Image (cartoon, rainbow, N blue to C red):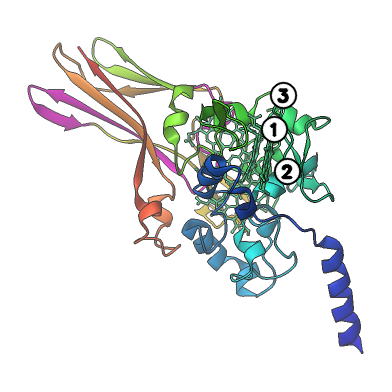
Amino acid sequence: MLKFIFLSLLSITSLLASKNFAPSEDCKSCHPLIYKEFSESMHANSTPQKDPIHGSVWAKHPQNLEFKKYGCGKCHTPTAEKDSMPKADSPKHQEGISCAYCHRIKSIELHAKSNTNITTSTEKNYFGTLEDHITSPYHGIVSEGNEHFKNGNVCIGCHSHKMNKHKLNVCSTNIDNEMDGANCVSCHMPKVKGSVSNFKDRKEHSFHGFAGSHSNQDMLTKYVDISLLRQINDFIVNIDNRTSHALLLHPLRTAVLKVSVTRAGKTTKLKDEIFVRVIGHNGKPAMPWTASTTLKNTMIQANEKRSIKYDYKLQSGDKVDIVLGWFLVNPKALKTLNLEDNEVATKFIEFKKESFTF
Ligand code: HEC
Ligand code: HEC
Ligand code: HEC
Ligand code: HEC
Ligand code: HEC
């Protein structure tokens, strides 16, 4: 009897929570360019099965080990069944963050632990920002009344912040709403060549590959400047982060500044400068769910200009090569996460390169 009540309660809640979102595959025939960019993005690949870095952290998570539920789904698989373990073979789960989901975000509730997206209940009616759209034979278009699409911050339902139960902000882009006015879309979805759909020939569309730390970094290099100041006995490298958030956000990342000097054909590598935010507990690095404090934070912050001094005397004819880049996973965490042989997790990603000759 008790089991019966329990089961029927479960099915009622899942019925209420279930909302049907058209699969992204449905958009492919009319929006081929946008679809292609999207399908290669981390939004389309945000599940534990498709993203090995996410998968390896989830593999260690107590909710997984205790076989409870996939709480990460709130942001990583928002159209999937809630309150259950990830169902690898469920199409709704493997959709990741789908086209229809994002385009149905109506409003965003602000909460201390993490924000919540409120989506429309009307299927196939999508918010957009085109000023003079034609009609679509497949779906309705709502171009008015959505402030989040208008100000380019429809992203902050998932990207604002994530606080754990020890009240530590594991990852935050926007904790105090200090980003109000800064526009995620203007930097991460720049206009690129090619039509919005194959119904009307337009010159450009908004990039749906979501330039970021995994791919398309070249679209973002212009927001970070590197310059060099030569002094009598040393030199200074300045990194000017003109981004409205820290250079990297996820605590798994490690940014590295590599500097070398070439003199008369011989190259000398100077000491690497490391930028990290390490979270932990009792003085030791810890997983995001056990961490209670930030142990160290040398990450370059929003709108910060960081100067790094090199005790090296430059001579005329010297060439200085500077590379700013990162590892998606801190090399010190690879072993714990069983990612030592994973190509994406171990690769050094070159973000920006500059050379100076004297
Ligand atoms: C509040 C929304 C939210 C929740 C809940 C959430 N995440 Fe995320 N997660 C994000 C966002 C946004 C990013 C992208 C951040 C970035 O790249 O800086 C991300 C990125 C990650 C990454 C980096 C992936 C990569 O490829 O480098 C890992 C690992 C991760 N999340 C693990 C988890 C795990 C495990 C859970 C559940 C226990 C979880 N997340 C729950 C929003 C969330
Ligand atoms: C049968 C063709 C067709 C299909 C399928 C289709 N669309 Fe469209 N869509 C269009 C046309 C046509 C436009 C208008 C383009 C224009 O004005 O240049 C459009 C415009 C849009 C806009 C822009 C609205 C604006 O004003 O900014 C969004 C968002 C959109 N579609 C989302 C989707 C999503 C999500 C899917 C898949 C779930 C999808 N579409 C599938 C034809 C289609
Ligand atoms: C439903 C939640 C959700 C929404 C809404 C959302 N994102 Fe994400 N986003 C994520 C998650 C989760 C990840 C990490 C996926 C992973 O790495 O496994 C991510 C990753 C990213 C990344 C990192 C890509 C990379 O190369 O690592 C960028 C950039 C990004 N999102 C930008 C945006 C922008 C811009 C918007 C708003 C237009 C947006 N996101 C809306 C959940 C969301
Ligand atoms: C002025 C341009 C600019 C604005 C505005 C901006 N970003 Fe970024 N973002 C960058 C740059 C530059 C990077 C670092 C380079 C990279 O990841 O390729 C970055 C990186 C990221 C990453 C990857 C971080 C990681 O650790 O993996 C995410 C996620 C992201 N931004 C989300 C957002 C969101 C959400 C907003 C709006 C609240 C936003 N950004 C606003 C320029 C911008
Ligand atoms: C993470 C959220 C997110 C996802 C996922 C997403 N979009 Fe968008 N889309 C946006 C935002 C935000 C804009 C408005 C961009 C702007 O104002 O420049 C947009 C704009 C559009 C437009 C209007 C034309 C343009 O280029 O501005 C179309 C059409 C569209 N999206 C279709 C799609 C389709 C089809 C998919 C999946 C293949 C998809 N979107 C996935 C957030 C998303």
Q: Residue at x 50, y 54 (%)?
A: 284
First-in-chain label (2 vs 3): 3
Q: Which mark is residue 153?
A: 1
Instruction: Identify the residue under disc 2.
Output: 137
Residue 209 lies left or right of residue 343; in this view the side is right
Q: Position of residue 100 (x, y in %)?
A: 70, 48
Q: Nearer the viewer, mark 2 or mark 3?
A: 2
Disc 3 to disc 1: CB gap under 8 Å: no
- How crowded pointer 3 is (Cα within 10 Å; few <14, some 14-19, many 20+) is rated as few
Foreground of the two, 104 or 70: 104
- Residue at far bottom of view: 1
Task: Answer with left or right where residue 180 lies relative to residue 144.
Answer: left
Answer above or below: position of 176 versus 106.
above
Percent position (x, y) of residue 250?
54, 45
Task: Decide if ligand 2 comes within 8 Å of the CB at mark 3.
Answer: yes
What residue is pinned by disc 3?
131
Residue 307 relative to residue 266: left or right: right
Q: CA distance from mark 2 to mark 1?
A: 28 Å
Q: Residues within 10 Å of mark 2 (few under 14, many from 20)?
A: few
Q: Earlier along the polypeptide chain: callout 3 or callout 1?
A: 3
Query: Which element is circle 2 on?
Result: loop
How far across and how far down the image is residue 117, in percent?
77, 46
Q: Amino acid at mark 2?
A: Pro
Mark 2 and mark 1 residues within 8 Å of each other at the beta carbon: no
Label 1 C-beta lies within 8 Å of the nearest ligand 4 atom: yes
Q: Quick check: 98 above or below 64?
A: above
> In the rendered structure, which segment of residues is drawn in magenta?
241-269
Q: Secondary structure at mark 3?
A: loop
Amino acid bearing label 3:
Glu
Q: CA distance from mark 2 to mark 3?
A: 18 Å
Ligand 2 lies under 8 Å from the Cβ of mark 2: yes
- Seen at 89% across and 85% down, the residue is 4
